[in-house]
Image: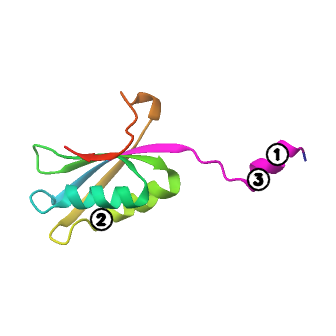
Amino acid sequence: MTLREANALAIPQLMPIAKRCLIAGRVQGVFYRATTRLKALELGVQGHAKNLPDGRVEVLACGETEQIEQFVQWLWQGSPASHVTEVQVEDVAIAALESVPHTFSTR
């Protein structure tokens, strides 16, 4: 085993990923986006949350795999007043983004 191979095994490779999530249910007018922003900042996730005209919330989440997995699971919880009925998740290529977010915002 070479030194490079040993280092690759010893140090987990952190690769940023991006997910686009569409959240349905009672998620508008119940502080869902604001609470989502706080959770994203806590986990170190970048992206945004915005209301959609059809009543859903769209979330773009960028970060390390473990952070994103925790965040996507949390999206089912949301704010205390919300009631999430569906979370659709799709992968997004980082290279396909117009710009990579450096913080988490609400729109």
C-alpha distance separating marks 2 and 3: 34 Å
First in sequence: mark 1 or mark 2? 1
Name the residue located 35 percent from the left edge and 64 percent from the top edge. 74
First in sequence: mark 2 or mark 3? 3
**Residue beneath disc 2:** 76
Name the residue located 89 percent from the left edge and 44 percent from the top edge. 2
Q: In this picture, is 27 found above or below 2?
A: below
Q: In this picture, is 98 found above or below 63?
A: above
SS class of the residue under badge 2? loop
Mark 1 crowd level (few <14, some 14–19, many ≥20, 10 Å Cα) = few
| First to last magenta residue range | 2-20
Of labels 2 and 3, the one closer to you = 3
Q: Is residue 88 magenta?
A: no
C-alpha distance separating marks 3 and 1: 6 Å
SS class of the residue under badge 3? helix
Q: Position of residue 77 (x, y in %)?
A: 28, 68
Q: Are marks 3 and 1 in contact (CB under 8 Å)?
A: yes
Q: Position of residue 50 (x, y in %)?
A: 20, 46
Q: Where is residue 98 in the image (x, y as percent from the top left)?
A: 36, 27
Q: In this picture, is 97 found above or below 15?
A: above
**Residue beneath disc 3:** 9
Amino acid type for the residue under numbered disc 3? Leu
Name the residue located 19 percent from the left edge and 72 percent from the top edge. 80
From the viewer's perspective, is 11 left or right of 40?
Answer: right
Amino acid type for the residue under numbered disc 1? Glu
Q: Do the residues labelled 2 and 3 touch (CB within 8 Å)?
A: no
**Residue beneath disc 1:** 5
Name the residue located 65 percent from the left edge and 48 percent from the top edge. 13
From the viewer's perspective, is 37 left or right of 10?
Answer: left
Amino acid type for the residue under numbered disc 2? Trp
Q: In this picture, is 38 found above or below 55?
A: below
SS class of the residue under badge 1? helix
